[in-house]
Image: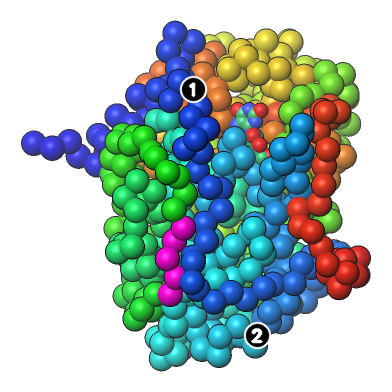
Amino acid sequence: MPPSDLNRVLEYHERTRHAIEAMARGPGRLDWASQPDPFRSYEDSSRVSLRKIGFAGRSETPAELDQDSISRLFFESLALSAKKSFAGTSWSLRVNPSSGNLHPTESYLITGPVAGLEGSPGLYHYSSREHSLEFRGRISSKSWEALGLPEGAILIALSSIYWRESWKYGERAFRYCHLDVGHALASVAYAASCLGWQCLLQENAGTADLVDLLGLGTIQNPEEVERPDCLLAVFPAGLSSWPCLSSSQILSLSPAGFRGRPNVLSGSHVNWSVITDASEAVFTPPDSAPCRRPSSGSSLSTHDFCRVLRQRRSAQAMDGKTTIPLAGLWRILRATLPDKVPFSLMPWDPMVHLVLFLHRVEDLDPGLYLLVRSDEDTGRLAQAMSAQKFLWQKPAAGPGDLDLYLLARGDARLAARRSSCNQDLASDGCFAVAMLSRFVWPLESIGPWFYPRLRWECGMIGQALYLGAEAAGLRGCGIGCFFDQMVPDMLGLEGSEFRDLYHFAVGRALDDPRLTTLSGYDLGKGDQERAAQG
Ligand SMILES: Cc1cc2nc3c(=O)[nH]c(=O)nc-3n(C[C@H](O)[C@H](O)[C@H](O)COP(=O)(O)O)c2cc1C
């Protein structure tokens, strides 16, 4: 009998764990000749250039949907934001981060008629290289209207090209792709919120529906397969109703024909078949999730973020001495709470909690702490960790809205660094984080297709930490390389009830003086003036 999808997912997870004795299987060395193009383009499709304009602050009322607001949404979420150069080579960086800067995530806009785009509803691929929309196909007006979406709503689909990531990271790449999807989702949600818009995942979209909608079925180079991940409704905030599309409504949007051919990314490939297998085991069935009212997504703590979306950068090293004031720490942690943007886009209960290695926080004992993001899990975690005699004390200085526990006082730098593949980032910042997710229960009770969603939630938390750090004048860095079992072992966690899925560090970055930083695009005079106007 073939293994069940659940077993295939669990098997993928087990075999791609990093341990001190054995790292997950990778290519060994990088084959620069086959390095994939980080940019997808659809050759021979017509292109709409977007204006390179961002926003100066948060919009108090929902922005009108037009070409400018669409330009701003992408410019502040998925566009290029900088170029680095060193010794004659240069590379682009984007508003959203990506493991290894490989950017496996692609994005698509599905919209009704908007002045400046096609006159009818249409499907577009977003090209970050030019900040433009590539027209892929016309959508029937009747089907678009039948969705009953609120005025000013659009849909954004995300997809992943695994080869971009597996070229460097081999079998573990599938994990990183989904962390990247989480970062991209959050990136879009923050930019949308700055425009006075709100987002909600449309979980009734099955993988097969999205393959048809995005035209990813027939024209694929099998070695560069691009799989759809999710569909996000973006709509004006504060409405009394919210979009909840069915699988058949989504399918009815599929264009009758597709324009453009996807570019070839590499001349040669390595087939990482375990990724193909895992990606098939997590296919989302259609109409699989009941619709849920979105939480209002209080953006109080995220107002500051509108200024810093395009300045986000990963720290490559940290200074090992800067401290963070208590209020600064609380502000960053609050941004990770489930009632905030971007988590209001998730139609599921939070599954991920934060193990905090607090190294340099003013007026707080260094040590190991736990931030429980869903109070229903407090008892479950305490029970699962009962083999270790932790303190479980609420810090006297802790604010009431954070379910924060001191587990053990002491120097947690070594534990943070060692568990993060010995990366100094984890010990040289103000604090480091390990994201502990419920694991077997959601996969068994909801379905194996939930596996990527656990990582999306982690990626979104990562994006909240990146922006929280920027707003506090510090810098963050995602840490996808960690030894999977070290933090659970330290906490006395056995079995698969909880798993460690992502690490992160926040502190004062040390810049590399060898690198030159340039702007993301060569802006023309008009663009520069508009960018300066905000
Ligand atoms: C999911 C994920 C995992 C990452 N893992 C690491 C890591 O283990 N070590 C590291 O130094 N940087 C890591 N990074 C940072 C990336 O290398 C960085 O995002 C990328 O180089 C692009 O740079 P930028 O974030 O400044 O745009 C990670 C980023 C993401 C999103």
Q: CA distance from mark 2 to mark 1?
A: 46 Å
Residue where numbered disc 1 is placed: 29
| In the foreground, 91 or 18 | 91
Q: Which quadrant of the frame does ligand 1 lie within?
A: top right
Magenta stretch bounds: 259-263
Residue 195: which quarter of the image? bottom right
| Image quarter (top left, top right, bottom left or bottom right) of the C terminus | bottom right
Residue flagged by tag 2: what amino acid is it?
Gly
Residue 223 seen by the camera: yes
Q: Is residue 462 left or right of residue 325?
A: left
| In the foreground, 254 or 142 | 254
Q: Is residue 197 left or right of residue 122?
A: right
- Percent across and percent down for residue 357 are 69, 21
The structure's colour scheme is rainbow
Tell me, yes or no, whether the highlighted magenta stretch contains residue 196.
no
User: What's the mark number on residue 116?
Assistant: 2
- Percent across and percent down for residue 173 are 45, 35
- Residue beneath the point at 42% across and 44% down: 267
Residue flagged by tag 1: what amino acid is it?
Arg
Query: Crowdedness of circle 1 by 10 Å Cα count: few (<14), some, many (20+)?
Result: few
